[in-house]
Amino acid sequence: MIYTVTFNPSLDYIVEVNNMTLGATNRTSFEQMLPGGKGLNVSFVLKNLGFDTTALGFLAGFVGEEIENRVAKTGVTCEFIKLSEGCSRINMKVRNVDGTEVNGMGPVIPAEKVQQMLERLDTLTKDDILVLAGSIPSSMPATVYSDIMKRLAKQSEKCGVAGPMIVVDATKDLLMNVLPYRPFLIKPNHHELGELFGVTITSHEEVIPYAKKLQEQGARNVLVSMGGLGAVLVDEQGGVHKSKAPEGVVVNSVGAGDSMVAGFLAGWLEKKNYEYAFYMGLAAGSASAFSEKLATSEEVAMVYQKSFLC
């Protein structure tokens, strides 16, 4: 089973406002409401591609109930931990005003609820995949991702069996702290990669040495998304895969990076081939960017065939 963890899920209220004016009443010309969070997006696209997933995370209040209802309707299995206080966050995204967003804070997550999550993750086996994606609430320790991986590594060593394959899509210390525990895949974008090393990255070739540095620090596979420039994968077998982005009209880039993670995993699980997984990741990420919503299997297949089977 593939498990995704979203520590701070949201209800995303996506709108368009024509001629938005600060200090005045503005009215929407388009509205859309979706459950949000990087882990959830990975689950949704994997489900669209034919892979069952279980979504883990924390929910609170009436917004949390609505998030769970909407996630369940997609066919993704829900195993959220419910909080008795606070309210899950609502994020407003004004997509036609320079990508303007107003994101909520989300509830405080008590230590005992974090412990409950850790105990649930303890049950994962070598046949499972765990995706840790996105930011964490301010009430949680900044080491939570590495704490999870350290705990699972100790458990595997104690039992003498391998633990789950782990994917991490995070930034800054959240990402760097997990490297000693050898995640199967990490997926920074090129801006985040440059920030880690204090450089500006603008080309595929500039990605490669820094991706290899992350491998030296423990990552098995490093997938770097580059928006319109495409992506680069440095795999654990020594392969370097580079590609420009598929051609198409970008409609909504929200969730494109998460879709790339989902596509990569789907491709890897299907053929155990890194080149194929890389192109599937690019196809899924681009297909979502070209769509109002997250990509369907048909949309991913169309982009893949058009861009990588020519």
Image (cartoon, rainbow, N blue to C red):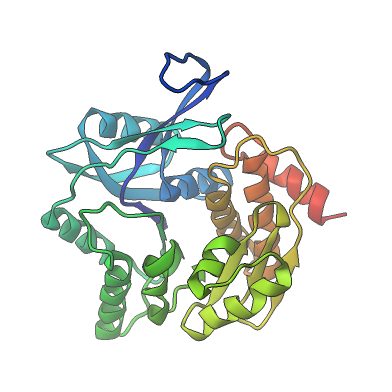
44 and 248: which one is in front?
248
In this image, 283 relative to 258: left or right?
right
183 and 86: which one is in front?
86
Q: Name which residue lies at 75% across and 43% down.
A: 302
Quadrant for the C terminus, please: bottom right
In this image, 85 relative to 281: left or right?
left
In this image, 261 relative to 158: left or right?
right
Image position, residue 141 (x, y; %): 23, 63
Q: Name which residue lies at 20% across and 63% down.
A: 119
| Residue 137 to residue 181: above or below | above
Q: Name which residue lies at 40% across and 72% down.
A: 126
Image position, residue 234 (x, y; %): 63, 75
Q: Name which residue lies at 39% across and 56% down.
A: 3
| Residue 63 to residue 260: above or below | above
Q: Residue furthest right?
A: 310
| Residue 160 to residue 31: above or below | below
58 and 30: which one is in front?
30
Image position, residue 255 (x, y; %): 53, 45
Image position, residue 51 (x, y; %): 52, 50
